[in-house]
Amino acid sequence: MIQIADILQTPLEYARLSTDELRDRITRRKAELNAVILGHNYQRVEIQAVSDFLGDSLGLSQEAAETNADVIVFCGVHFMAETAKILSPRKTVLMPDLRAGCPMADFVTADGLRRLKERFPGAAVISYVNSTAEVKAESDVCCTSSNAVEVVNSFPREQTLLFVPDRNLARYSAERSGRPYLTTSELGSEQIEELPEGAIVAWDGYCYVHDDLVFEELAAAKRRHPGAKVVIHPEARRDLLQHADFITSTAKMVDLAEEHDELIIGTERGLIDRLRQRFPEKTLIPLSGAAVCGNMKMNTLAKLAWSLDHEKHEIVLDEAVRERAEAALRRMLDLSGGWRPPSAEEEAIESAGLRSSGCDCA
């Protein structure tokens, strides 16, 4: 057991320890707590190295729910830890830094969504998994970047859909499903008396990392690597997606890295850095060297060790909110066939140090 005298008081004190000391402390304390560490694809490489599972937010939460762990430590951002708690209500869920939020999730609040629902009483609400528990609880169904189009197509063609909080994923889903599209900002600036039938009304939010990707950077990368295939996350803007060979989630980007020797990848740098470690013989090019999520990078080994020693910061959800949010997630899983265990190929990736989640999610 960790002795009281061994427990340091602040993450800053832990930061003075060596990497080896931190890793040893994390391993020992994890065993004492019967804990599992989840590392999102965008985490620092050193966090990924001590994680029990690597992948996307929903897939990681599903993996943890299947384990016999008593404690889940989610190295990601706040909505991800909430999702773990939604799916594992009897487990203790911790996150190392409560300030690690998601600006895109913060675009929409439960109150704001309720007001939009009042304006369109017959509409169904689709919330991207990159949203808070309270927003999920106000939704009919959730979606991921992989199944958003499938979820949209599950509703009657004539029904209005409210899509929160990502306008870019909403536009991509609208174009793929052949539905009219407009944003909440357009609703506010124009006198729209009646929506087109079956319109998708998108909350005007976005992921700054993906929204800031620009065509000039892609063009420069293609000039340097003319034979490379281009894969871009659907949170990016339409003008980028039009030039992609593949538009897909980070989980499927792992699969593409297995299949192709040269890729230009349009997503956060954390995934690309890890893929380069896994496939040093391949040419894996970040579309933008500046595509870094500062919120994801708030988690450090020192904060993780502090979190385990102090059993902080615990995620607590109102049970009524949790149950309604879980219902929206379960509806999505029912639509897309539910969670599946990792494939043999994914198990091989795991054994090499890179675990791809089994849901191909956001």
Image: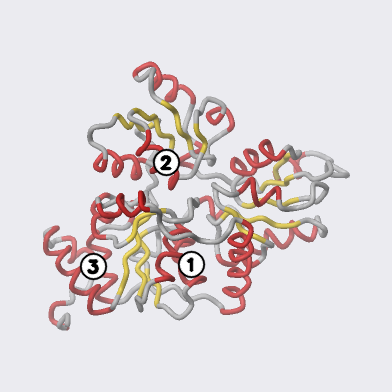
Kindly identify the amino acid type of the residue bearing the numbered disc 3.
Answer: Ala
Kindly identify the amino acid type of the residue bearing the numbered disc 2.
Answer: Met
Residue at x-position 52% and y-position 25%: 243
Q: Residue 15 carries which label?
A: none
Residue at x-position 51% and y-position 61%: 339
Q: Where is residue 76 in the image (x, y as percent from the top left)?
A: 39, 58
Query: Which quadrant would residue 328 be assigned to in this image?
Result: bottom right
In this view of the protein, which residue sits in the foreground, 279 or 131? 279
Q: Is residue 277 left or right of residue 285?
A: left
Alpha carbon separation for disc pair 1 and 2: 25 Å
Q: Residues within 10 Å of mark 2 (few under 14, many from 20)?
A: many
Return the residue at label 2: 253
In this view of the protein, which residue sits in the foreground, 222 or 116? 222
Query: Which quadrant would residue 129 be assigned to in this image?
Result: bottom right
Q: In this view, does 41 lie to the left or right of 328?
A: left
Return the residue at label 3: 305
Alpha carbon separation for disc pair 2 and 3: 30 Å
Alpha carbon separation for disc pair 3 and 1: 20 Å
The earlier-in-sequence mark between 2 and 3 is 2
Q: Which of marks 2 and 3 is in front?
A: 2
Q: Where is residue 272 in the image (x, y as percent from the top left)?
A: 33, 40
Q: Position of residue 279 (x, y in %)?
A: 26, 38
The earlier-in-sequence mark between 1 and 2 is 1
**In the rendered view of the protein, which quadrant contains the N terminus?**
bottom left
Q: In this view, does 202 lie above or below 300?
A: above
Q: How crowded is mark 1: few (under 14 residues within 10 Å), some or many (20 or more)?
A: many
Residue at x-position 43% and y-position 35%: 266
The earlier-in-sequence mark between 3 and 1 is 1
Return the residue at label 1: 82
Q: Where is residue 121 in the image (x, y as percent from the top left)?
A: 82, 60
